[in-house]
Image (cartoon, helix red, strand yellow):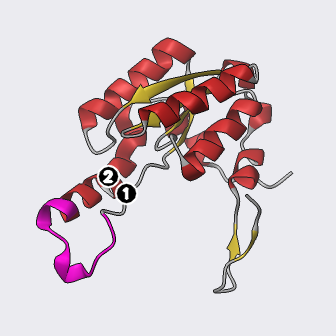
Amino acid sequence: MNSGLHPSGRQTISCYIVLSNLRLHDMQVSHNTLIVTGASRGIGAAIATLAGERGFSIAVNFSTGESEARAIVEKIISAGGSACAIHADVSREEDIVRLFETAERNLGPIKALVNNAAITGGFSRVDSVSAKTLTRVMAVNVAGRSCARAKPCAVCQPSAAEPVAPS
């Protein structure tokens, strides 16, 4: 994943650049847990893998794609990292709470969250989308964004929200 220009002329930012800007100097990375939602494939899988290489303990969250999530965990562990796969549907508050509790219990204090999980609901004309599908998309993509409020941790602290200049 590289940075470059979007056809609109806006700069795109790769997950590598985002991770390189984490405040690694403020934390002993080998003892910090990063939760990556939607980490069983695509961008989430790439972020989880790279962060594992950077020394984070990774909670690989998945709602579907258990075998893919376990493959990401195995990749991180085989490279010397620490990771576990955790099933949780980010549209359900009780699953979010369990995700945070399980990650902390298995991997240690949570210091960062990449809230990546999202769904499309399929591709069709707007007038063909059912109310059930629309409700599900909104639950995952909008309500699921409240994931960080599940448990007070470093993710929620004001210092974690400070912008970080590229190094």
Q: What's drawn in magenta, residue-wise?
A: 122-133
Indicate the position of residue 142 as horizontal and vertical percent values.
Answer: 33, 57
Q: Residues within 10 Å of mark 2 (few under 14, many from 20)?
A: some
Q: Which residue lies furthest to the left in this view?
A: 131
Indicate the position of residue 5 as horizontal and vertical percent values.
Answer: 73, 77
Q: Residue furthest front?
A: 67
The N terminus sits in image quarter: bottom right
To which residue does mark 1 refer? 119
Q: Distance between the residues labelled 2 and 1?
A: 7 Å
- 132 lies above or below 161: below
In the image: residue 35, left or right of residue 74:
left
Question: Residue at position x 76%, y 32% from top?
Answer: 53
Indicate the position of residue 73 as horizontal and vertical percent values.
Answer: 59, 27
Q: Do the residues labelled 2 and 1 touch (CB within 8 Å)?
A: yes
| Residue 33 in view | no
To which residue does mark 2 refer? 140
